[in-house]
């Protein structure tokens, strides 16, 4: 499940051909040159999946192979599925988006190599355990190593908080707004002091992040529909409460000029989001550099996003592919992907590297790792069903109707549940 806000990344990404053409020299992969010479290794990624600089260096590092990364446009999941069905031109390595892993894990596990058979069980301690679990089947097969994770936090405008008489330092904001109620109280105070500013930029975010803070989503492990149960209703009511308090900014389609203006002019005084959300803010409001800070998220830790590198079963030299993956996703390279793309590392050893510990100018020199690292360590684990993303969509759509068009909240809830049940039935959920 993803919110409608855009995930913005750096531009100027190289194509696979460009990567190959620009890679010179060559390192050793640990295998003899003769065994590597001429081996073709196609790597499929999407825009922003992993640092293109890391991929470029990977081409050079495995210089005896024909390692060829390709940025696949369009709907990545569908293109991968189509290729798997045709059993032709499969890549040796592919990215799998975090929201798509439940589908592949639940219905296409046999199309991927169990990485434990290649030695992943010996290096799994390098990655956060809860993220590995998301790529592990019920019978223990590991279908991917994590590229990144999305520990969540509260991003806020320190200058506007000061104007409203709210706490301004990250530790004080974290303490005062540790709960959703505390956060909402701050929003009411902010609105009284600075009428043109709103604490919440996205009317659906209290719902989406409350769900992510729990241990149950929309479908349970027995493939039963549970989206009409109290944990979802609680999340719904929380989002409605924020709207009724008047602390949610007027609706603007995320990523548009109006949405970006809200970050620039202070209409949006804070925003809940995953670690990667900082690049959204950097690109939307570059002139606000130094005015933002990061605090812990109200209500406790949650994760939003994070993807994997996997090996298709029909994709060629599995052992070599695994060697490439482990190099691309070592702590040093995950730290580089954080700098280049804003993808927060899934390897905790990265957290002590300079790329993560350095002060961040956009956040006034704050060392944001002090917020993100503890959150990454405490993410609640919830079962993710293949149909969860589809079943969640009606709730987000109906919240948009309440936020943007003032639809009656109770009617919107009933419509969301009704539509979600229909979607669940189509997904084979009972």
Image (spheres, grey):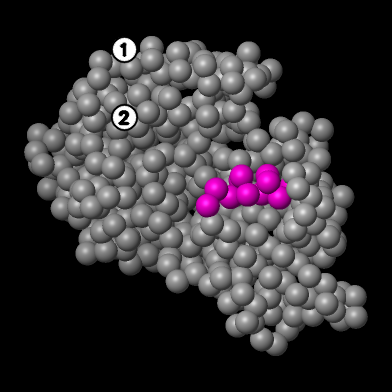
Q: Which residues are magenta?
A: 74-84
Q: Position of residue 129 (x, y in %)?
A: 67, 43
Q: Position of residue 287 (x, y in %)?
A: 22, 64
Mark 1: few, some, or many residues within 10 Å (few <14, many ≥20)? few
Q: Residue at x 9, y 38 (%)?
A: 195
| Residue 121 visible, this angle | no
Principal secondary structure, stretch drawn in magenta = helix
Q: Look at the numbered disc 1 and give the secondary structure of its residue.
A: helix
Q: Look at the numbered disc 2 and give the secondary structure of its residue.
A: helix
- Magenta run includes residue 132: no
Please give the count of numbered marks on the rendered protein: 2
In three-dimensional space, the C-alpha distance between marks 2 and 1, rounded to whole angstroms, equals 14 Å
| Residue 342 visible, this angle | yes
**Relative side of 125 to 241, left or right:** right
Vertical arrangement, residue 279 with respect to residue 313, above or below: below
Q: Which residue is mark 2?
A: 400
In the foreground, 25 or 421: 421
User: Which image quadrant for residue 200?
Assistant: top left
Q: Residue at x 56, y 33 (%)?
A: 380
- Magenta run includes residue 77: yes
Q: Residue at x 59, y 28 (%)?
A: 387
Vertical arrangement, residue 386 with respect to residue 126, above or below: above
Q: Which residue is mark 1?
A: 410
Asked if disc 2 and disc 1 are in contact, CB closer than 8 Å, the reply is: no
Vertical arrangement, residue 286 with respect to residue 398, above or below: below
Q: Residue at x 72, y 72 (%)?
A: 67
| Labels 2 and 1: the sequence-earlier one | 2
Task: Work out which quarter of the rendered image holds the C terminus and state it.
Answer: top right
In the foreground, 81 or 359: 81
Mark 2: few, some, or many residues within 10 Å (few <14, many ≥20)? some
In the foreground, 64 or 31: 64
Q: Position of residue 251 (x, y in %)?
A: 23, 37
């Amino acid at each position: 499940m993803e919110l409608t806000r855009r995930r913005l990344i750096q531009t100027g990404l190289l194509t696979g051909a460009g990567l190959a053409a620009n890679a010179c020299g060559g390192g050793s992969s640990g295998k003899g040159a003769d065994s590597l010479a001429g081996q073709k290794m196609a790597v499929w990624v999407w825009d922003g999946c992993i640092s293109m600089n890391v991929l470029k260096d990977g081409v050079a590092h495995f210089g005896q192979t024909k390692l060829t990364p390709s940025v696949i446009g369009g709907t990545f999941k569908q293109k991968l599925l189509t290729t798997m069905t045709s059993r032709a031109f499969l890549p040796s390595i592919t990215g799998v988006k975090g929201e798509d892993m439940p589908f592949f894990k639940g219905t296409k596990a046999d199309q991927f190599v169990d990485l434990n058979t290649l030695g992943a069980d010996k290096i799994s301690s390098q990655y956060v355990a809860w993220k590995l679990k998301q790529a592990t089947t019920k019978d223990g097969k590991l279908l991917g190593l994590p590229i990144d994770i999305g520990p969540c936090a509260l991003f806020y405008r320190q200058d506007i908080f000061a104007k409203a008489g709210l706490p301004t330092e990250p530790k004080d904001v974290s303490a005062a707004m540790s709960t959703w109620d505390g956060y909402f109280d701050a929003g009411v105070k902010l609105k009284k002091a600075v009428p043109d500013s709103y604490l919440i930029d996205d009317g659906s975010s209290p719902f989406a992040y409350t769900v992510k803070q729990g241990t149950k989503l929309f479908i349970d492990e027995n493939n039963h529909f549970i989206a009409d149960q109290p944990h979802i209703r609680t999340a719904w009511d929380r989002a409605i409460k924020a709207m009724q308090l008047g602390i949610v900014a007027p609706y603007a389609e995320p990523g548009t000029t109006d949405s970006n203006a809200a970050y620039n002019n202070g209409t949006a005084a804070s925003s809940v989001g995953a670690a990667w959300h900082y690049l959204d803010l950097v690109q939307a409001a570059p002139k606000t550099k130094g005015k933002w800070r990061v605090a812990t998220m109200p209500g406790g830790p949650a994760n939003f996003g994070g993807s994997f590198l996997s090996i298709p079963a029909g994709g060629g030299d599995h052992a070599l592919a695994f060697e490439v993956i482990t190099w691309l996703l070592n702590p040093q390279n995950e730290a580089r992907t954080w700098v280049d793309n804003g993808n927060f590392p899934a390897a905790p050893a990265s957290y002590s590297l300079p790329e993560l510990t350095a002060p961040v100018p956009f956040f006034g020199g704050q060392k944001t790792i002090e917020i993100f690292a503890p959150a990454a360590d405490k993410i609640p684990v919830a079962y993710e069903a293949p149909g969860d993303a589809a079943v969640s969509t009606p709730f987000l759509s109906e919240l948009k109707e309440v936020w943007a068009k003032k639809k009656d909240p109770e009617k919107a809830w009933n419509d969301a549940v009704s539509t979600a049940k229909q979607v669940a039935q189509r997904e084979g959920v009972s």
